[in-house]
Amino acid sequence: MTEYMILLHGDERVWAEADETARRRAYERHGEFSRLAGERGHRITGGAELAVAAAATVVRGTAEGVSISEGPYAETVEQLGGFYLVETDDLPDLLQLVGIISDGEPVEVRPTVTETADQAETAGTIPTTQGP
């Protein structure tokens, strides 16, 4: 199976201003995504809803030391709001299921780098390191 990270981007202002009904519907879409993923043979191995981008800390290490700054890496309207890790052999079906949680917001699906070049090529990625 190939592992994919599903990155949920969105406008934090929309979520902050959403009423309880809108939030419940969003969580229901995620529940439906999880249920259907399991039924169709995809395996969710991880995931989380992230705190607002303002809670982020950016760390940059250089030869001179470590720089630590508050706030998100990029100052944009759309921020990373959560993620899933999913293992699957059926990417086209997984992409269809991701549409359930998109609700018009962009969702990025990206294969993770595997230990061997063969697996990375299968996943459609260029390996950045060679395994032992």
Image: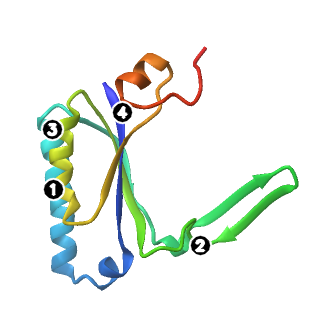
Q: Which residue is mark 4?
A: 3
Q: Which residue is mark 1?
A: 100
Residue flagged by tag 4: what amino acid is it?
Glu
Please indicate whether residue 72 sits to the left or right of residue 38 in the image.
Answer: right
Nearer the observer, disc 2 or disc 3? 3
Q: Position of residue 15 (x, y in %)?
A: 31, 77
Mark 3 residue crowding within 10 angstroms, few (<14) / some (14–19) / many (20+) = some
- Extreme-top residue of the structure: 132
- Residue 18 or residue 91, whichever sits in front: 91
**Residue 71 — which label?**
2
**Residue 67 — which label?**
none
Q: Position of residue 100 (x, y in %)?
A: 15, 56
**Residue 93 — which label?**
3
Say whether marks 3 and 4 touch (CB < 8 Å): no
- Disc 3/disc 4 C-alpha distance (Å): 14 Å
Q: Residue at x 43, y 16 (%)?
A: 118
Please indicate whether residue 31 sits to the left or right of residue 54 in the image.
Answer: left
Element carrying mark 2: loop
Element carrying mark 3: helix
Q: Quadrant of residue 94?
A: top left
Q: Position of residue 92 (x, y in %)?
A: 18, 37
On screen, 118 above or below 36?
above
Residue flagged by tag 2: what amino acid is it?
Gly
Q: Residue at x 16, y 47 (%)?
A: 97
Residue flagged by tag 3: what amino acid is it?
Asp
First in sequence: mark 1 vs mark 4: 4
- Residue 8 or residue 117, whichever sits in front: 117
Say whether marks 2 and 3 touch (CB < 8 Å): no
